[in-house]
Image: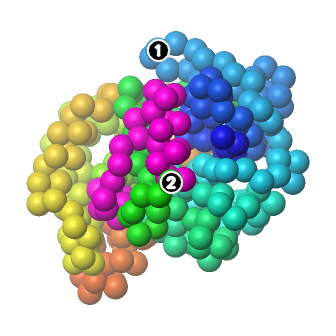
Amino acid sequence: MRIATMATGGIGGYIAVKLTKQGQEVAAIARGSHLEAIKNKGLQLSSKHGIETVKPWKATSDTKQIGPVDVIIFGVKCHALEEAAEACLPMLKDGTVVIPFLNGVEAATRLSEVLPEKNVANGVAKISTTVSKPGVISQVGNFAQFIFSELNSTSSPRIERLQEVFRSAGIDAPKTDDIDRDLWSKFVLFSSISGVTSAARCNVGDIRGSFELSELCRNIMSETAMVGRRLGINLPTSLEENLWYTIAELPTNMRASTAIDLENNRPLETKWISGAAIRFAKKAAVSTPLNQTIYSLLSIYENGKS
């Protein structure tokens, strides 16, 4: 398959390394020093399993140099979605599938406003990765799962083919019968972990070691889950408790990408995390005071702050 990673950050870079090693033609879209490092030294994945280095089929910032592909792995920051989506147009053909792996639950809807809906699927990534330095993707922990389907939660030949490619590369890619449930399940967790590790400038170990932060984390999950259920999302009744057990198993030093962006004075995704919880709450006619507080605390840093 010909696959493009738009862009080759934490998630796109992880997938690009794994699928290139498996023999797929992967075009890594990047820019600046990250792109130069990929061209000169290859793309590197650093994890507990060691270091893996590959030379992608193509590495460029210009999608016109790539041409039509079978799959676009769409993993940019939420605030860059529209610009990146437009850059995907030269890579589309009739059957190209664009799978968003973004934080939040609105990416597929937003993509469909820029790209033909027939090309857009939906997905959720459960992994902790970041660009630790130009050309290097670092993974925290061992968990890595990618769930995706067509927009209506059904499978299709193109979805099944990509799932098989992922599995052949050693990537967990289970089938799903409800992608909205899967997206919201992660959203419930991420709204909490993102909000607390960012606002409190802490990591998961700090949360587990503090009664106050633990209670805040659990209460944000309950608040976000309540919104989803009011909107008709089929979230399990045991979701919040199960997610708390998940947090107990996460690496102690793990922080949400929002916290890392805050530390590095980069723009934040809060508009599509706690901000989205607030927007959906209004639609459901309920209040979300905890998400509102988190959003207020981080809003001054939303566009980056030096």
The residue type indicated by label 2 comes to Pro
Of residues 222 and 168, the one drawn nearer to the viewer in this rendering: 168
93 to 62, vertically: above or below: below
Residue at the spot of label 2: 157
Residue sitting at x 39%, y 63%? 154
Q: CA distance from mark 2 to mark 1?
A: 32 Å
Return the x and y of residue 149 as percentages of the image width and height: 44, 57
Q: Secondary structure at mark 1?
A: loop
164 to 49, vertically: above or below: below
Q: Secondary structure at mark 2?
A: helix
Residue sitting at x 53%, y 36%? 165
On screen, residue 229 versus residue 183, left or right, reads left
On screen, residue 54 versus residue 67, left or right, reads left
On screen, residue 94 versus residue 107, left or right, reads right
Residue sitting at x 80%, y 36%? 58
Crowd around label 2: few <14 · some 14–19 · many ≥20 (10 Å): few
Return the x and y of residue 292 as percentages of the image width and height: 35, 70
Residue at the spot of label 1: 49
Badge 2 or badge 1: first in the primary sequence: 1
**Residue bounds of the magenta highlight:** 158-185
Of residues 115 and 299, the one drawn nearer to the viewer in this rendering: 115
The quarter of the picture where residue 16 lies is top right
